Image (tube, rainbow, N blue to C red):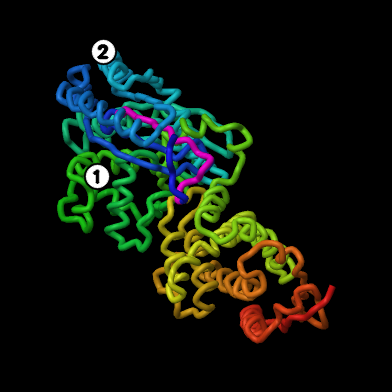
């Protein structure tokens, strides 16, 4: 029997995935198969199996020795974490090396599990699924840059289109170019000419997948002083990042701001990742470049979901799970998500699909800070939301959801928001967060964070643009000075007369 704390979802059975790449090998233990996967344990080693494969045709012998030793630890960790299943996948180096299958057979004996060696097409497919699972309504080209290969595939909605595998992985390109940046650029340009699908990506999004590009993004964050250190959905400005990519591609990175935060083993491949990205931008002409923290592993996990679960909204699923774990009542949180949608309609506030999703997520997460000291509930909630491993949400959306909780707990004062957070959210998100926060400050005084009452609170239109919140007669005792004071604040934020009354 596995004993889990209340900090864990009780209906999940852990499973493990080991991803044997050309540069890194990683074990990830997930809480379970879920629409928004949560990591219980994560460990990697930079083995460099594909180093030198261009000249020798074989896996690096020292890397093989280190990997085999590490597999014993990975299996023990998986068992220690209570994993029900151990899934093992291998990519470019293992499938292409002369001694690849010998290595795979040795690894299978140690791990006690069958290893699935992915073809280039399968690798591209699972990488595309990872992007589909991590973003809401994707539309563009996903590029997974590993140590041995680059997988490019067209993705739109749930549809996976044309794809191609190219020998442009960081380690391979380093070997082919013999360490010369100019040669690397020529090789990348030549190979990318075979990727005719890039022409169909003009004006769409390019999704960056893989450790080299994630570290390139981290360096860009450090260099620009970006305020939110969250990798998923980080966006490069296509035009604004040109000088940065040029400098990294040249190899002149030793004195770049924040380079010390990139592991030394990763730094050597940054110029090759930058070179490939430069050539993709030239060939594709994307409207934006977005980093995905999800790739082949998460795509494989996504493939294990039932079709109904795949269709669920990743952000709302994660928000609801956090409400289950931290809120006083997840049922009340769901009621808020529905009721505030009706309220916004009455207020005449139009919502896009994205607006509605973010509002619902903010309601589901509005009570996760209740155990904190009253003076810090808003700040703690904002920090949890801003830094949570959510998917299906961009960075301004994170800021909106976090600011809603800040306003809900600490009051709707603009000076409560730092200039960096205001800039990250944008003026529209800040104003919407103030409105939603003010509304939640009113209704929490009636519901006491418990379910049942919210669906019975109704809005009544009066003369002109005035509005009255009608409380059922059975709950007339809930009226008082504090709710009226909060309603006055909401009235001021919306700029229209509002009051509270008892009625049917």
Quadrant position of the C terminus in the picture: bottom right
Apparent side of residue 352 relative to residue 139 in the rendered image (left or right)? right
Apparent side of residue 2 relative to residue 332 in the rendered image (left or right)? left
Farthest right residue?
504
Task: Residue 19: say if magenta.
Answer: yes
Of 241 and 224, the residue lying toward us: 224
Q: Which residue does the numbered mark 1 point to in the structure image?
A: 249
Compared to residue 451, the image places residue 58 above or below, namely above
> Residue 300, image x and y in percent?
46, 30
Of 325 and 60, the residue lying toward us: 325
- Rendered residue at 26%/26% (across/down): 71
Q: Secondary structure at mark 1?
A: helix
Quadrant position of the N terminus in the picture: top left
Q: Quadrant of residue 79?
A: top left
> Residue 418, image x and y in percent?
41, 74
Q: Which mark is residue 102?
A: 2
Q: Secondary structure at mark 2?
A: helix
Query: Magenta span: helix, strand or loop, mainly?
Result: loop
């Amino acid at each position: 029997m596995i004993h889990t704390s209340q900090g864990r979802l009780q209906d999940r059975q852990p499973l493990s995935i080991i991803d044997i790449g050309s540069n890194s090998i990683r074990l990830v233990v997930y809480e379970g198969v879920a629409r928004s996967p949560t990591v219980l344990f994560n460990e990697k080693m930079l083995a460099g199996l594909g180093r030198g494969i261009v000249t020798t045709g074989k896996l690096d012998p020292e890397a093989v020795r280190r990997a085999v030793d590490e597999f014993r630890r990975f299996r023990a960790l998986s068992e220690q974490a209570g994993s029900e299943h151990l899934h093992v996948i291998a990519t470019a180096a293992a499938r292409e090396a002369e001694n690849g299958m010998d290595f795979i057979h040795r690894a299978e004996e140690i791990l006690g599990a069958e290893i699935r060696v992915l073809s280039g097409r399968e690798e591209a497919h699972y990488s595309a699924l990872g992007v589909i699972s991590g973003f809401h309504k994707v539309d563009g080209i996903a590029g997974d840059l590993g140590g041995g290969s680059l997988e490019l595939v067209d993705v739109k909605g749930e549809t996976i289109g044309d794809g191609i595998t190219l020998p442009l992985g960081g380690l391979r390109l380093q070997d082919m170019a013999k360490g010369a940046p100019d040669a690397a650029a020529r090789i990348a340009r030549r190979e990318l000419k075979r990727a005719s699908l890039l022409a169909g990506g003009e004006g769409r999004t390019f999704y960056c997948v893989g450790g080299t590009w994630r570290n390139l993004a981290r360096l860009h964050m450090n260099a620009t002083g970006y305020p939110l250190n969250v990798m998923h959905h980080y966006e490069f400005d296509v035009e604004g990042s040109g000088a940065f990519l040029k400098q990294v591609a040249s190899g002149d990175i030793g004195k770049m701001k924040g380079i010390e935060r990139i592991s030394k083993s990763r730094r050597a491949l940054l110029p090759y990742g930058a070179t490939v990205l430069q050539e993709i931008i030239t060939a594709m002409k994307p409207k934006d470049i977005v980093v995905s923290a999800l790739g082949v592993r998460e795509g494989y996990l996504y493939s294990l979901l039932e079709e109904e679960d795949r269709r669920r909204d990743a952000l709302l699923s994660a928000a609801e799970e956090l409400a289950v774990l931290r809120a006083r009542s997840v049922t009340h949180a769901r009621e808020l998500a529905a009721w505030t949608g009706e309220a916004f309609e009455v207020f005449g506030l139009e919502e896009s699909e994205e607006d509605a999703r973010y509002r619902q997520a903010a309601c589901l997460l509005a009570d996760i800070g209740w155990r904190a000291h009253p003076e810090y509930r808003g700040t703690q909630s904002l920090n949890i939301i801003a830094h949570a491993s959510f998917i299906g949400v961009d960075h301004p959306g994170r800021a909106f959801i976090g600011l809603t909780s800040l306003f809900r707990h600490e009051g709707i004062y603009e000076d409560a928001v730092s200039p960096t957070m205001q800039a990250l959210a944008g003026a529209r998100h800040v104003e919407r967060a103030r409105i939603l926060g003010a509304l939640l400050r009113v209704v929490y005084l009636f519901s006491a964070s418990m379910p049942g009452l919210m669906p019975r609170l109704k809005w009544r239109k009066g003369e002109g643009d005035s509005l009255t919140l009608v409380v059922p007669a059975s709950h007339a005792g809930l009226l008082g000075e504090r709710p009226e004071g909060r309603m006055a604040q909401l009235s001021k934020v919306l700029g229209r007369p509002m009051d509270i009354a008892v009625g049917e």
